Image: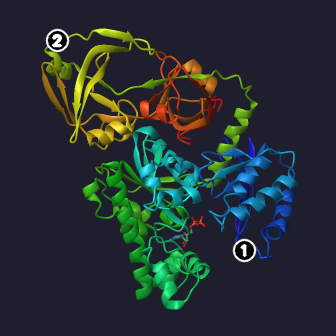
Amino acid sequence: MHILVINAGSSSLKAAVIEAATGERVAELSTDRLPDRGDHRATLHPFMLELREKVSGIALHGIGHRVVHGGAEFTGATRLTDAVEAKIEALNDLAPLHNPVNLAGIRLARELWPEVPHFAAFDTAFHHSLPRRSQTYALPRDLMREHGIRRYGFHGLSHQYVAGRAATFMRGDYRSLRLISCHLGNGCSVTAIEFGRSIETSMGMTPLEGLVMGTRSGDIDPGIPAYLHRKTGMDTAEIDALLNRQSGLAGLSGAGNDMRHILERSTEGDPDSQLALQVFTHRLRKYIGAYAAVMGGVDAIIFTGGIGENSSIVRHRAAQRLDYLGAVIDEDLNHSARLTATEDVIEFSRSHSRVKLLAIRTDEQLAIARDCAKLLRKEDEVNTLPTIPIAISARHCHLTRETLDKLYGPGYALTVKKQLSQPGQFAAEETVTVVGPRNRLERVRILGPLRSVDQIEISRTDEFFLGLDAPVRESGKVDNTPGCQLIGPAGSVDLEDGVICAWRHIHMTPTDAERFGVRDRDTVDVAVDGPERGLTFGNVLIRVSPDYKLEMHIDTNEGNAAKIDSGDSGVLRGTHHAGTLRRRATMVT
Ligand code: ADP
C-alpha cells in the first residue's frame, strides 16, 4: 500500500511516499527552510504543488498527516473528515505553535487530493494510556478540567516505534518488557513504557516540559516566569518565546542549538558548551533514574532521535554508572555504533548487562504509514462485529495450593458456589480476609481452580481503604506488586506480592479475535451505551484463548462510574496494536 506521509511544520515540510508493508521510500521531498509568507497556507502552497507534481505517477492509497496535539480526544490515528478537522482546530490553543500549521497542511492536501482518503496521526496518541497519577498536575482541579490542563506527552509515534523495534530485537514480547525510551532530537523527551503502555513521559501539556532541548528550556522552577516578568517587564508572549526558542542548548551554549557544534566546541575547551552538554546529560540521567523507579526496574534503555542515534558521547554520559540499575555500558560498542538503513538497532551494553542499552533509528514516517494502512484495511471490512457482553468483577483472589493449605488446612478442596462464564472457572463458597496496612476487607471471594501464583484483585477504592498502592496489571503479572496478609479459618499467610488492580480486559476465542482484527494483548477502546450517558473505555486489554468466552471484565468502580451493570454490552471502537512489534502478513487490522 502506498501512503503519502506529510509533516507540515512552520519552517519545514517533510513528505514521503512509503510502501507500508516494507518501509520502502517510493518518493521523498523535504525542505528545512520554508519562506515565511505570513500565513501557513500561503507558505505551504507552492511546496504542496511541487509535491503533487512529484508523486503524480504514483497510485496513492492514502495520505497520512502528522498532527502534534490530539488532546484527550484522539487516542490513535483517525480518518480525516470535516468534523475531525474541526476537533483538531479546537485544540489550537493547546498547541499554538504546531497544530495551526499541521491543519493548514491537511486542508491544502485534502483540496489537492480530494479522491484519496486522508488520516491524522498524533504525537500525543501513544500517551493516552498515562495513568491519572502521571497525567495530573497539582493545580486546582476545576481549573484544570475547564482548560484541559494535564500532561499529554509528545513524540508518541517515535517512542512507540522504537519500543516495538526494541522488543523485536530482544525477541521479547513488547508487553512483557519495561522500557525507557529517550528521543533526543531538536525536541527531546523520555518515556517509561511498561508492558506496552506509556505510563510516564517528560513532555507535558506542551512540548516545553522535561529535558533540555535544542532551544527549549525543559523543566524550570515555575516561579521563574513571574520573576522574569517582575524584573524585566517581559510579557507572557516574550517569556514563552524565550523558553521555547532562546533557551536549551542554544541559550546555554550561546553557540546555537546543533549538538554537533556544541560537542566540537566542548572538545575545544569552550566552557559554555561544556556546561550545556553537562546540563543536558545530567537532566537525562535524572529522568532515566526516575523512570526506572516508577516502573520498579527496566529491561532496556533506548536512545533515538538525531542525538540519541548518533552521539556516542551523549549516550556515554547518560548511560555510564547505571550499574546499580543493572545496565552496564560497553564503551567500545558504544563508540563504534553506526546506525544505517539496514542496521537500525545497535546494542551497546556488555553481554552480562541485565538491562540492554540500545541505539535505535526511529522512523516516524513509517509509523504513520503503517497506522494509515491499518485503518484502510479496517475500512474494507464489513462492519458486522458482535457486541461484547460486559461483566463486573467484584474483588476476589486466586490462590495457590500452598496458600490454601495454610488458610483452610492441608489438602482442603474448594466448594463450587457458582460456575463463572469463563469455562472451568468458578466462585468458591470459601472467602478470605485481606489485611492491608490500614484496614482489612472481610469475605473476599476465592475463585477456582487453584493457580501457580497468588493474586488478589481489588478496585481503586479498595486500594485506598486497605492502604496499598497496587498497580493496574493484567492477570498473572504480579512482580513488583505489593503484598498483604490473608487470613482464613486455619491460619494466615503473609504474601510478599500479588495485589493488583485488574486491567480491564476482554476474553475472547481466536475466532473472535480474527473477526475483531485483534491479537492477544492488544488494547482496544470499547464504547458502551450506559443508561445515562454513552462512554468509551480506553485501554481495554485483549486476552485470547480457545478456552475463553467473549466477555469484557471491568471492576466495580468502573461499573459504578459508568453506571453500567453486568449484562450490558459494548462495541469495539479503536484498536491499538503494540504496533510495530511483529509483522503480520495476513492479519486484518
Ligand atoms: P528533529 O527532532 O527535528 O527530528 P533530529 O532527530 O534530526 O531532529 O535531531 C537533530 C539533532 O541531532 C541536532 O541537535 C543535531 O545536532 C543532532 N545530531 C545529528 N547528528 C549528530 C551527530 N553525529 N552527533 C551529535 N548530534 C547529532
What residue type is disc 1 on?
Arg
Give me the C-alpha separation between circle 1 and circle 2: 76 Å
> Is 360 on the left-hand or right-hand side of 486?
right
Answer yes or no: disc 1 within 8 Å of ligand 1. Answer: no
Name the foreground residue: 19 vs 336. Answer: 19
The reply to whether residue 8 is in sight is: no
Q: Residue at x 63, y 57 (%)?
A: 69
Rendering coords of residue 164 (x, y %): 51, 45
Q: Residue at x 84, y 66 (%)?
A: 45
The label number, if any, that marks residue 33 in the structure image: 1
Q: Position of residue 294 (x, y in %)?
A: 35, 52
Q: Residues within 10 Å of mark 2 (few under 14, many from 20)?
A: few
Q: Residue furthest bottom?
A: 232
Quarter of the image holding residue 447?
A: top left
The quarter of the picture where residue 137 lies is bottom left
Foreground tag (1 vs 2): 2
Q: Are marks 1 and 2 in contact (CB under 8 Å)?
A: no
Rate crowding at label 1 as few (under 14), some (14 to 19) or many (20 or more) other CA atoms within 10 Å: few
Closer to the camera in the image, 47 or 516: 516
Residue at 52% x, 50% y is 127
Respond yes or no on whether mark 2 lies under 8 Å from ligand 1.
no
Say which mark, if any, is on residue 134: none
Say left or right for 513 vs 77: left
- What's under tag 2, amino acid-wise? Gly
Residue shown at 58% from the left, 76% from the top: 240
**In which quadrant will I find the N terminus?**
top right
- Report the image quarter containing ligand 1: bottom right
Residue 268 vertical placement versus 521 (above, below): below
Left or right side of 64 for 339: left
The residue under label 2 is: 411
* Residue nearest the observer in this picture, 301 or 392: 392
